[in-house]
Amino acid sequence: MAICNFWTCDIAYGFEEKSKTLRETKIIDVRSPREFLYAHIPNALNFPVLNDAQHEEIGTLYRHDPFGAKKKGSVYICQNIASFLEDEPIFHPKFKLILYCARGGQRSKSLWSILREIGFDCERIEGGYKQYRQEVLERLSKRPKQKFLTLYGATGCGKSELIERAYLWSIDLEGLSKHYGSSFGDQANHFLGQPSCAMFENLLDEQLCIKEGCVLIEGESKKMGRIIIPNTLFEAMHQGIKIMIKSSMEKRVERIVKMYSCISEEHFLHSMQKIRPYMPRVFYDEVLRSWDVRDYEQIASILLEKYYDHVYRQNQCDFMLCSDDMDAAYQEICHLKEELEKNSL
């Protein structure tokens, strides 16, 4: 099965209208857990026909004994597939199964052959994950077709909340990267580590495939933690319709406390060390004293006024909104979207 528009729009992202009449489709990644964890097709389920240790063992054996490796690998694969078929409810005729491995080779073929013999409706992705990645990178190398409404504004002004409210027509770069783009940004809202760059690109490609027309996005920096936004998207979103979001200090402090109150002491102190050269010593020390008594409001207030507002680069914007009333701000953005769509007809 080739990966094409049918794949990216219908299979990977839920079948939309077709799901009403066809079987629900499940994507099965048969690679090892380590391969899957690093990066996979979004929404895929991992059913490894070789676990990490087995995959490494067979790979090592194959270098000097290909026949022996195939024989031993077959034993492991049969045992693992038997376990799946016996215990996993996903292997049910009500589902259509799409299988892939690293290059569309023996691992996916092993499971596919058995399922086909049983009578399952299943297919294999030609070229496997490698082919999928090539197509992702090819799509990301082209300028997006979307028209972007791009949010700017100082830290804590509510951009993330607006992106979240518009989840049906927004792309949440912070959510995809698991990072808020700041020195403290990878532990806010209980983020548990960033995805690999490859996984971020896969998730971003998924969003760009399903979100069309006007798309709300935040004008992020090029780098978010260890994630780098592709040049084509970075340029397109910063050339979109620019909306400056303003907010009172009281509301900004409230949002920052809510987002970052879960941060660990170790991470907080490590992040403070990173920004130490950019803060006057008197305010730096005051933040540490406030941390000792867990005065989060005071910490947020000092960091916003004495650090973030000083390093934030102002942008020339087309519109300006106040987010103190979040409902009103979101309605204004929706109205702007409607006007842009009307004018583009």
Image: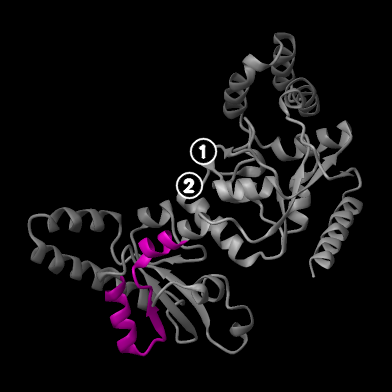
Q: Point out the stretch of residues depicted in magenta.
A: 108-135
- x and y percent of residue 223 in the render? 57, 38
Q: Residue 256 sits in which quadrant?
A: top right
Q: Is 254 placed left or right of 216 in the picture?
A: right
- x and y percent of residue 339 in the render? 86, 62
The amino acid beneath tag 1 is Arg
Q: Which mark is residue 101?
A: none
Q: Is residue 137 magenta?
A: no
Q: Point out the tag, 1 or 2, that comes first from the N-terminus.
A: 2
Q: Which residue is mark 1?
A: 226
Q: Is 329 placed left or right of 92 in the picture?
A: right
Of residues 295 and 206, the one drawn nearer to the viewer in this rendering: 206
In the displayed structure, would residue 233 be above or below residue 244? below
CA separation in Å, label 1 and label 2: 8 Å
- Give the secondary structure at mark 2: helix
Tag 1: Cα neighbours inside 10 Å, few (<14), some, or many (≥20)?
few
Of residues 1 and 193, the one drawn nearer to the viewer in this rendering: 1
Q: Quadrant of the N terminus?
A: bottom left
**Dominant secondary structure of the residues highlighted in magenta in the image:** helix
Q: At 73% across and 22% down in the image, what residue appears?
A: 307
The amino acid beneath tag 2 is Cys
Q: Which residue is mark 2?
A: 197
